[in-house]
Image (tube, rainbow, N blue to C red):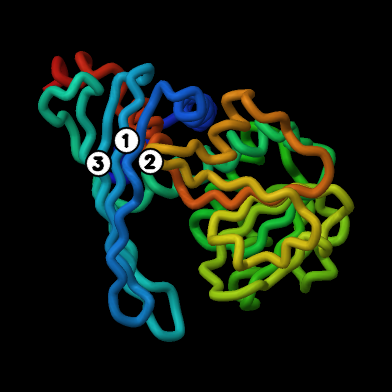
């Protein structure tokens, strides 16, 4: 499947629900994923591979990805997902392109926000960075939760102009002081160090960090991560499964990307494994 075919096949609400189901299954021990394997490359680039199986969704995946940085601009990323039935039979489909990763990252972020109980259309949402990933998050928050008020922190005037043109409703682009009334923030910047603080936001705000906790000065926020291993389930999976309560007050979710959410994407894009076999 190409990016265009994936976009045509994926309903955002169905994808968020599938990500919720996949993370909950991981939290309950009803799904499994291998530890992320990463090979560093020169200049800050990398190659990585991940894999997971979620029997309840009927699929398993292996994924290979890479990133090559570029001076003065966006680097180049690649992604290939090989999907097959969860019963271990022959692989069924290949999903090539970055859109599947962006969509599942955005949907998993929305699933985390919903698990926290922080999806509130009446309150401003801060976007730290406005590249393709945060644009996908904003699109889902707008379409699924009616968000119409945005606070945007970006590094360039051009990115600010893109945010003003793309986001529905009230859009305030500014420095860290512009974040002061946001009760929810999502970051996707690729920055190497802190660009904002949880203290910049409204008291008790929630942050979903898609680019590493280093991007935030965390102050006294409760930290939750999604780094599940064969021996320990990450806090995000436990939260979504209902095994841990949603914390009160300020919270930061360090969401590095769970392979089970790639399974969720495959299940929504492809449908039932048998139906895929029948089509081909």
Q: Quadrant of the C terminus?
A: top left
Left-right relation of 130 to 252: left
Label 2 crowd (10 A; few <14 / some 14-19 / many >=20): many
N-terminal-most mark, 2 or 3: 3
Report whether 47 appears left or right of 238: left
Q: If you read the primary sequence from the N terminus, does the residue marked by circle 3 or circle 1 appear first?
A: 1
First in residue order: circle 1 vs circle 2: 1
Res 175 quadrant in image = bottom right
Query: What secondary structure is marked by label 3?
Result: strand
Is 151 above or below relative to 244? below
At horizontal 47% and vertical 38% (from top left) the residue drawn is: 232
Q: Nearer the viewer, residue 96 or 46?
A: 46
For the residue pair 88 and 59, the one nearer the viewer reads as 88
| Element type at mark 2 | helix
In the image shown, does 265 or 147 lie closer to the viewer? 265
Asked whether the residues under the numbered discs 1 and 2 touch, taking CB atoms below 8 Å apart as contact, a structural biologist would say yes
Quarter of the image containing the N terminus?
A: top left
Residue, x 60% and y 61% (percent of image)? 213
- Secondary element type, mark 1: strand
Vertical arrangement, residue 67 with respect to residue 70, above or below: above
* Residue occupied by mark 2: 259
Q: At x 82% / y 39%, what residue is drawn?
A: 248
Identified at 76% across, 66% down, the residue is 197
The residue indicated by pointer 1 is 52
Q: Residue 195 vs residue 201: left or right?
A: left
In-image side of 185 versus 214 (left or right): right
- The mark found on residue 62 in the picture is 3
**Residue 182 spot, x, y in % from top left:** 81, 53
Q: Distance between the residues labelled 2 and 3?
A: 8 Å
Q: How many labels does the image show?
A: 3
């Amino acid at each position: 499947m190409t990016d265009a075919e994936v976009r045509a096949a994926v309903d955002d609400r169905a994808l968020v629900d599938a990500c919720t189901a996949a993370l909950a299954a991981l939290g309950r021990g009803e799904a499994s994923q291998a530890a992320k394997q990463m090979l560093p490359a020169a200049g800050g680039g990398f190659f990585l591979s991940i894999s997971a199986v979620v029997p309840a969704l009927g699929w398993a995946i292996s994924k290979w990805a890479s990133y090559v940085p570029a001076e003065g601009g966006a680097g180049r990323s690649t992604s290939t997902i090989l999907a097959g039935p969860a019963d271990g039979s022959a692989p069924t489909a290949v999903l090539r392109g970055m859109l599947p990763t962006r969509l599942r990252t955005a949907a998993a972020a929305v699933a985390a926000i919903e698990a926290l109980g922080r999806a509130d259309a009446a309150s401003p949402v801060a976007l730290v960075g406005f590249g393709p990933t945060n644009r996908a998050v904003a699109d889902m928050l707008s379409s699924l939760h009616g968000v119409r008020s945005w606070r945007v922190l970006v590094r360039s005037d051009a990115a600010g102009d893109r945010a003003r043109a793309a986001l529905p409703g009230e859009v305030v682009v500014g420095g860290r002081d512009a974040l002061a009334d946001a009760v929810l923030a999502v970051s996707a910047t690729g920055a190497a160090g802190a660009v904002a603080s949880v203290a910049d936001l409204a008291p008790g705000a929630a942050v979903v960090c898609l680019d590493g906790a280093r991007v935030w000065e965390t102050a006294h926020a409760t930290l939750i991560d999604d780094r599940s291993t064969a021996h320990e389930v990450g806090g995000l999976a436990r939260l979504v499964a209902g095994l841990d309560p949603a914390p009160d007050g300020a919270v930061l979710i360090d969401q590095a990307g769970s392979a089970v959410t790639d399974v969720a994407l495959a299940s929504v894009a492809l449908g039932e494994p048998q139906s895929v076999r029948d089509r081909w």
